Image: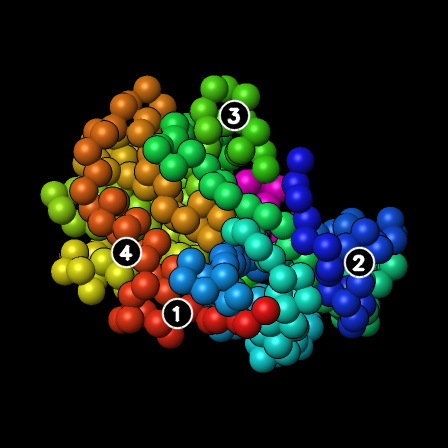
Amino acid sequence: MHQFLPIAYFQNRFVPFKDANISIATHALHYGTAAFGGMRGIPDPQNPSQILLFRLDRHCQRLSQSAKFLNYELTAEKIEQIIIDFVKKNKPSTSFYIRPLVYSSGLGIAPRLHKIEKDFFVYGLEMGDYLAADGISCRISSWYRQEDRSFPLRGKISAAYITSALAKTEAVESGFDEAILMNSQGKVCEATGMNIFLVRNGRLITPGFDQDVLEGITRDSVLTIAKSLGIETIERSVDKSELFIADEVFLCGTAAKITPVKQIETFKLSGERPVTQKLRDKLFAITENKDPQYKDWVYSIGI
């Protein structure tokens, strides 16, 4: 059962979460004409009167860019200020997740993006670990990731997540924790809401943007951190069989953070994960504002 934060931003004002409701005729509900973001926040371990948000500016920029695919102009600066005010009003006391969403709020029945009202809301919920921190099992999904030529994959569009939902349920109902999707060329793409990395011979490898992956913010953070630690990084296509013989595999995302993979299909991976652990430790320190090198990645809000 989710524990939602008490205040939401809805229809240009802050209201009790229980009162933030939409019509059953809402366009986005029927056609997936929405785009969302997600970011984590925690009370500062050194100063609980401060809330720390990880890469707030980058998250707001991506959502603003996603809104453009919906024919909706919403600046990153406006999103950022609303989220800051949202945190101040809710005064969260534990680790939490923020979900901002832009959507076609009109009640029309034609699948279109022009001449229909748009809106923006924000809500939040308490959140600990999204996936098991000690490692998860994955299967290769029978469902394939969409292609950018038929879907705007540079945006975090809600309609795309039907594929994720199908893949996740398929994985869990067949005895696995998570699914790995391939792209239309049969190459490794991503998980249901996370990017994927593998380690071979000390080198960090991840599918490039030409493989139809989401432009993940945690993905970008991992690549930046790895380079600063002297770990060689490679962005390229990845074959399915390469996952089975990798030294390490992990998933990453805002909700999942960095989650190691211990099994893919029937192939068990090593429990020794030195690169993954090094990256996890570094990312954890950064999100707690304990790493001066990355202080500009952490936004502090006084409550």
- Disc count in the image? 4
Residue at x 38% of width, y 52% of height? 211
Cα gap from disc 1 to disc 3, whole angstroms? 34 Å
Quarter of the image with the C terminus is bottom right
Q: Are marks 1 and 3 in contact (CB under 8 Å)?
A: no
Name the mark nearer the viewer: 4 or 3.
4
Residue 254 x, y percent position in the rendering:
47, 53
Disc 1 packing (10 Å; few <14; some 14–19; many ≥20): many
- The span shown in magenta is 158-164
Mark toward the start of the polypeptide (4 vs 1): 4
Residue 24 x, y percent position in the rendering:
87, 49
Cα gap from disc 4 to disc 1, whole angstroms? 13 Å
Cα gap from disc 2 to disc 4, whole angstroms? 37 Å
Place residue 157 in its image quadrant: bottom right
| Residue 186 visible, this angle | no
Mark toward the start of the polypeptide (4 vs 3): 3
Vertical position of residue 102 compared to residue 187: above or below: below
On residue 282, the disc is 4
Mark toward the start of the polypeptide (2 vs 4): 2
